[in-house]
Amino acid sequence: MINKLPVSAIIVGYNEARLLEQALKPLSFCDEILYFDLGSADDSKEIALRFGAKVIDHARVDSCEWIHAKYSKSTKHEWVLITDPDEVLSEELVAEIHHIFNGGVPLENIGAISSPWIFYFKGKRLYGTNWGGINRRILLVNHNRFEFRELIHLGRKIKEGYTTYDIVFKGKNFIHHYWMIGFRKLFEKHSRYLRNEGEARFKNGIRSTPREIALQPFRSFRNSFIAARGYKDGFSGFFLSCFWAWYETSAKIRNYAYQNKRTNNRRSSV
């Protein structure tokens, strides 16, 4: 019998049946699994039910941050694990989570737990670019000590007075992030993200100027391909570095447009 931990998992999906099973298998230690389906036409919901998840139908949203902000405090347990259908927790990482929740780490002042995170592009691990190497992301949060906001990429914040516990990378204890299966998915997903980037960055105090926008493509490509050693991934590294330059420049343009819109609105209301 699997030792269940007082953890609620939230996973959001849309037509991810081919990935969902491998993502749900390692979550069997969670006492509660909530799967939010955004209108899948495949058998995603049936797969989720097979793994004991509670399936919740939800209208399509641009990003899972909207789901987290709305439902993270409605879970059975105060500790919430946030994951996606394209992420798989390794056995070693699951063992470490068991260790933490079975007294291995005092949790009284911890608001979040972060995990090592490794990206794959078209099935191959990335060693360079903005996404390559050993990354890190928040995996578990205490919903009373953590804040989720409806902001793309910038909607997560630990509350004052609490700390983040970082699971140390030991070689195999990480999240396998099967990030993108191909070019079409990459552009589709990030084009959707861009609809909200301008506002999200503005609300986090980020401002852009025409000069920064003009320089951004060169800076982003240099950072991804040279500084982050995108050249180690061959053509994929070159392509993804160009993609990162496009995305960051587009995000800055959206941010600049949003801040101008807010300025004009304030002027018109005076």
Image (cartoon, rainbow, N blue to C red):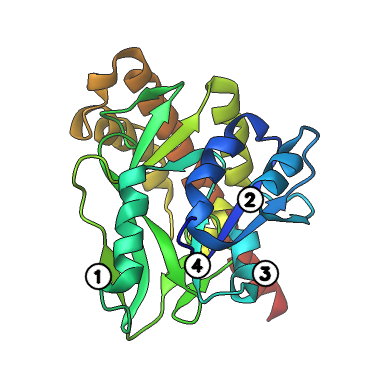
**Residue sitting farthest toward the front:** 1
Q: Which structural element holds mark 2?
A: strand
**Quick one: label 4 or label 3, which is nearer the N terminus?**
4
Comes first in the chain, label 2 or label 4? 4
**Alpha-carbon neighbours of circle 4 within 10 Å: few (<14), some, or many (≥20)?**
many
Distance of label 4 from label 1 (alpha carbons):
16 Å
**Which amino acid lies under the numbered mark 3 shown in the image of this protein?**
Asn
Q: Amino acid at mark 2?
A: Val
Front disc: 2 or 1: 1
Label 2 and label 4: CA atoms lie apart by 17 Å
| Mark drawn on residue 12 | 2
- Please determine whether, in this image, residue 237 is positioned above or below residue 101: above
Find residue 21 and report its horizontal and vertical position in percent. 59, 37
N-terminal of the pair, mark 2 or mark 3, is 2
Residue type highlighted by circle 4 = Val
Q: Quadrant of residue 205?
A: bottom left
Query: Which of the two residues, 71 or 193, is positioned nearer the viewer here?
Result: 71
| Neighbour tally class for label 2: few under 14, some 14-19, many 20 plus, Cα within 10 Å | many
In which image quadrant can residue 259 be found? bottom right
**Label placed on residue 104:** 1
Q: Are marks 2 and 1 in contact (CB under 8 Å)?
A: no
Q: Residue at x 48, y 41 (%)?
A: 87
Location of residue 49 in the rendering, given as x and y in whole percent from the top left corner: 72, 48
Disc assigned to residue 265: 3
Give me the residue at 41% from left, 33% from top: 244
**Numbered label tally:** 4
Distance between the Cα atoms at labels 3 and 1? 53 Å
Observer-nearest residue: 41 or 263? 41
